[in-house]
Image: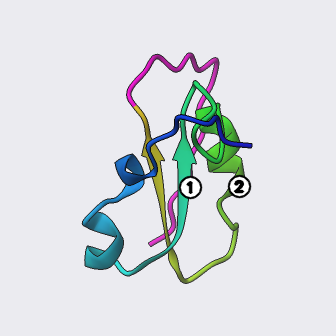
Amino acid sequence: MHKRNCDETKWESRLISKYNVTLVLTVDSNGCGNFTKVQEAVNDVPDSSSHATLIILNSGTYRLSSFNVFIDT
């Protein structure tokens, strides 16, 4: 659920069209994104997809205990 004063335009990115991104996941520690934690967004990326996924982070401090990403190109 988004907070009332969230600026949705901050999630716009030229990378979406440049890389033909079909799934955009947003992370904002204040609750204005799809997720509040980076690992939650990473976990939500489909395992077997031929489509590009973009994770956009809002500015802020994100504490990670461990961060694992495997990229198969």
Seen from this angle, which residue lies furthest front?
4
Write down the quadrant of residue 68 in the picture.
top right
Specify the amino acid type for callout 2: Asp
Mark 1 residue crowding within 10 angstroms, few (<14) / some (14–19) / many (20+): some
List the single residue furthest toward the right. Answer: 1
Q: Residue at x 36, y 47 (%)?
A: 10
Please tell me which residue lies in front, 7 or 20. Answer: 7
Q: Which SS type dominates the magenta stretch?
A: loop
Q: Position of residue 3 (x, y in %)?
A: 64, 35
Is 43 positioned to the left or the right of 68 in the image? right
Up the image or down, 24 lies above or below 65; here it is: below
Relative image position of residue 49 (x, y in whole percent): 62, 78
Residue 44's label in the rendered image is 2
Tell me: 40 left or right of 53: right
In contact (CB < 8 Å): disc 2 and disc 1? yes
Name above or below for residue 21 compared with residue 36. Answer: below
Specify the quadrant that holds the N terminus. top right
Screen quadrant of the C terminus = bottom left
Quadrant of the rendered image containing residue 25 = bottom right
- Gap between marks 2 and 1 measured at Cα: 8 Å
Magenta span: 59-73
The mark nearer the N terminus, 2 or 1, is: 1
73 shown above or below 5: below
Query: On the image, numbered disc 1 is attached to which residue?
Result: 25
Task: Find residue 38 and report its image quarter.
Answer: top right
